Image (cartoon, rainbow, N blue to C red):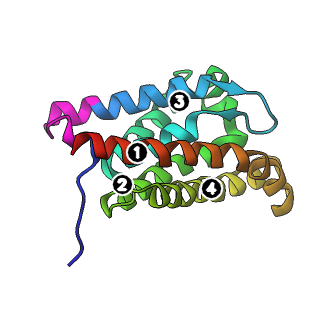
């Protein structure tokens, strides 16, 4: 029998339909704000999105986090300028793979959090690394398709420039999430 841990946010907010919907919308809004905090790069800008995506998974749980990111994608697909540089989906086609990867990464990190991977620094860092790997995998395929890049070109353009930043984000989360759990106990 495996032990399941309720998401961190459930320690503060009761699970009601209204609260769940509010958290999903708040996650999508937070992701769209994080998309605007960026360092322009080609073909993928450096933003705070990945940090928020993985943090949503760790704090909201797999279901609500992946719903938040699905809503975020739907907002962009509907023409709301929520993506980096306030672009809509057609303006970010080279990065579409990364965006789709957000949904799956948040679900994975949320699943891992339910297994206790949001309570110790090492486990948080491992879960963020796994979530980042999912985002990279989708992103590399997207870059290959959208820009006709080879696998190595897509890795060089869409993974290598982000490794240090993602390691810093994982380290920040590894320091903060266990403290949050300690505080709520």
Q: Seen in the image, is 110 located left or right of residue 126?
A: left
Q: Main secondary structure of the magenta part?
A: helix
CA gap, disc 1 and disc 2: 7 Å
Give the CA distance from mark 3 to mark 1.
29 Å
Mark 2 and mark 3 residues within 8 Å of each other at the beta carbon: no
Residue 119 is labelled as 2
What is the x, y in percent for residue 179? 37, 43
Residue located beneath label 4 in the image: 138
Q: Secondary structure at mark 4?
A: helix
State the separation of the CA atoms marked 4 and 3: 18 Å
- State how far apart marks 4 and 1 are (Cα): 26 Å
Q: At which x and y percent is residue 102?
A: 52, 47
Q: Earlier in the sequence, mark 4 or mark 1?
A: 4
Q: What is the crowding at mark 4: few (fewer than 14 residues within 10 Å), some, or many (at least 20)?
A: many
Return the x and y of residue 144 as percentages of the image width and height.
Answer: 77, 55
Q: Is residue 43 above or below residue 76?
A: below
Tell me how far mark 2 sits from mark 3, CA to CA.
33 Å
The residue pinned by badge 1 equals 177
Sequence-first tag of 2 and 3: 3
Q: Which residue is mark 3?
A: 76
């Amino acid at each position: 029998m495996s032990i399941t841990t309720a998401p961190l946010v459930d320690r503060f907010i009761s699970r009601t339909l209204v609260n769940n919907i509010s958290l999903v919308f708040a996650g999508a809004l937070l992701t769209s704000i994080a998309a605007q905090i960026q360092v322009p790069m080609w073909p993928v800008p450096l933003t705070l999105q990945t940090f928020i995506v993985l943090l949503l998974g760790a704090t909201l749980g797999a279901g609500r986090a992946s719903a938040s990111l699905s809503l975020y994608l739907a907002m962009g697909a509907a023409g709301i300028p929520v993506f980096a540089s306030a672009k809509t989906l057609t303006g970010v086609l080279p990065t579409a793979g990364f965006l789709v990867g957000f949904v799956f990464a948040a679900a994975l990190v949320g699943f891992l959090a339910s297994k206790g991977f949001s309570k110790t620094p090492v486990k948080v860092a491992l879960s963020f690394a796994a979530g980042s790997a999912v985002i990279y995998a989708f992103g590399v395929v997207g870059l290959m398709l959208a820009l006709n890049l080879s696998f190595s070109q897509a890795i060089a353009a869409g993974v290598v420039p982000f490794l240090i930043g993602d390691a810093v984000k994982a380290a920040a989360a590894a320091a903060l999430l266990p403290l949050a759990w300690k505080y709520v106990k």
